[in-house]
Structure formats: structure tokens, C-alpha cells
């Protein structure tokens, strides 16, 4: 039976046999039996990481070690509220932070702790403890952003929308024009994508 360790663009953590291309960390969320408790994070430092780095090896959901979370790709990790790891993704982390300094200075300095605090405010509704979403014109959103239509998550890619599935993306659908949509990717990260960051996309 697959472990409950796969994160969707809606920020939910689900069990699926499909493999991801990136890993993430939100702290220790599992028990000695590799089952998640109620908590979906234990700290604000939500990072996304590459699967292989310096030949390090981990046993999934080791007791008292952080819970390894997985994403289809970086675009999904961003939608779920994560940012690049400063160690295993140093170059992409630096680009993200430089763009934060240029595009998100009103939200705080481009230091890890300040960025993580600002992202926490942008990704979590404090009343519900669930993903914070907002409305925006679809025409104004950059490629690499996730939106929700009819309870399905879609990745914006050029003139098309790609429906999310844990195993990959569905066939490209024509991108509607002139409508407002629900945005899943946190607003600060949308700014950064619009300024030139290109999230890695599977497939």
C-alpha cells in the first residue's frame, strides 16, 4: 500500500502509487507506523528538493525524522506553497530569492525566514488552516501557475490548460479568455513566475 506522502496542487497530502519528480519537507508529520497525524506542517520552512543529492539515502518516514513529501514537479510544489531548497537547489533558490527582492519587497526582505513567513501568510487561511486561494483574471496569469476550474487543478501552459493527475498531465485544453479563475499558486510566487522564473514541469 502506498504511503500518504504525495502533495497535490490543492495542498492535500494523499496516497498514490504514482511517482513524483521532487521531494519536500514540512517537518515530522508521521508516527512510528508511517501514518500521518492531523498536522500538515510543523514549521514554516516549506522547501522543495531534488530527488538525488550527494548520494544521500533516506528511509521513508523514519521515526522522528522529517516526513518526505513528493510532488509531480516544481509547478505543483509551488502551488502547494513550497519554495526551492537553498542547499540542493542552490542556483534556483538564488533566482527565486533575487526575484523576491525585486518583486515582493512589500512583503518583507528576501531572507529565508522572512520569505517563509510571508509565504505562510499567502498559502494558509488562518481561519480554516487550509490552502488560501484568490481570484484573478486568467489572461493575466503566467505560465507555470496552477488554477482551479470545476474542482480540477489545471496548469497554465501557453494557450492551453493541462489538467493535473498524480501520474501526469492530461491532454492540453484551450485556455479560455476573459474569465476570472481561482488561483492555487500563492500570490507572491505568481509574481516571481511572472517576473521570469520558470518552474520545472514534468513531461
Image (cartoon, rainbow, N blue to C red):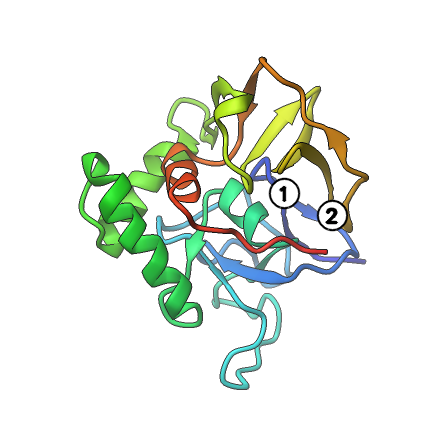
- Mark 2 neighbour density, 10 Å: few (under 14) some (14–19) many (20 or more): some
The quadrant holding residue 86 is bottom left
Are the residues at dot 2 and dot 1 in contact (C-beta closer than 8 Å)?
Answer: yes
**Dot 1: what SS?**
loop
Q: Is residue 161 above or below residue 76?
A: above
Tell me what residue is drawn at x 54 percent, y 49 percent: 77
- Mark 1 neighbour density, 10 Å: few (under 14) some (14–19) many (20 or more): many
Tell me what residue is drawn at x 43 percent, y 68 percent: 89
Does 74 sit left or right of 121 as displayed?
right
Figure quadrant of the C terminus: bottom right
Does 113 sit left or right of 21 as displayed?
left
Tell me the tag on residue 93.
Answer: none
Which residue position holds label 2? 166
Q: Tell me residue 136's x, y (percent).
A: 48, 19
Q: Tell me residue 185's x, y (percent).
A: 49, 36
Which residue position holds label 1? 8
Q: Tell me residue 29's x, y (percent).
A: 51, 53
Q: How many numbered callouts?
A: 2
Residue located farthest toward the front when viewing the structure as drawn:
159
The residue closer to the viewer here, 76 or 67, is: 76
Figure quadrant of the N terminus: bottom right
Q: Tell me residue 105's x, y (percent).
A: 20, 40
**Dot 2: what SS?**
loop
Tell me what residue is drawn at x 49 percent, y 46 percent: 78
Q: Earlier in the sequence, mark 2 or mark 1?
A: 1
Does 35 sit left or right of 100 as displayed?
right
The residue closer to the viewer here, 53 or 173, is: 173
> For the residues marked 2 and 1, what is the alpha-carbon distance in whole angstroms?
7 Å
Tell me what residue is drawn at x 79 percent, y 40 percent: 170
Amino acid at each position: 500500500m502506498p504511503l500518504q506522502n504525495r502533495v497535490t496542487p490543492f495542498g492535500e497530502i494523499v496516497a498514490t502509487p504514482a511517482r513524483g519528480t521532487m521531494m519536500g519537507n514540512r517537518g515530522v508529520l508521521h508516527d512510528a507506523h508511517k501514518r500521518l497525524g492531523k498536522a500538515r506542517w510543523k514549521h514554516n520552512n516549506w522547501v522543495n528538493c531534488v530527488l538525488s543529492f550527494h548520494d544521500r539515502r533516506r528511509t521513508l518516514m523514519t521515526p522522528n525524522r522529517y516526513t518526505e513529501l513528493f510532488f509531480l514537479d516544481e509547478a505543483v510544489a509551488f502551488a502547494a506553497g513550497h519554495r526551492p531548497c537553498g542547499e540542493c537547489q542552490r542556483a534556483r533558490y538564488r533566482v527565486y530569492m533575487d526575484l523576491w527582492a525585486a518583486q515582493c519587497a512589500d512583503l518583507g526582505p528576501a531572507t529565508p525566514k522572512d520569505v517563509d513567513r510571508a509565504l505562510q501568510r499567502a498559502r494558509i487561511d488562518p481561519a480554516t488552516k487550509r490552502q488560501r486561494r484568490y481570484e484573478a483574471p486568467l489572461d493575466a496569469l503566467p505560465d507555470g501557475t496552477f488554477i482551479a476550474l470545476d474542482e480540477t487543478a489545471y496548469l497554465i501552459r501557453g494557450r492551453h490548460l493541462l489538467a493535473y493527475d498524480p501520474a501526469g498531465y492530461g491532454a492540453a485544453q484551450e485556455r479560455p479568455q476573459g474569465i476570472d479563475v481561482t488561483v492555487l499558486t500563492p500570490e507572491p510566487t505568481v509574481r516571481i513566475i511572472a517576473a521570469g522564473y520558470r518552474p520545472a514541469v514534468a513531461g
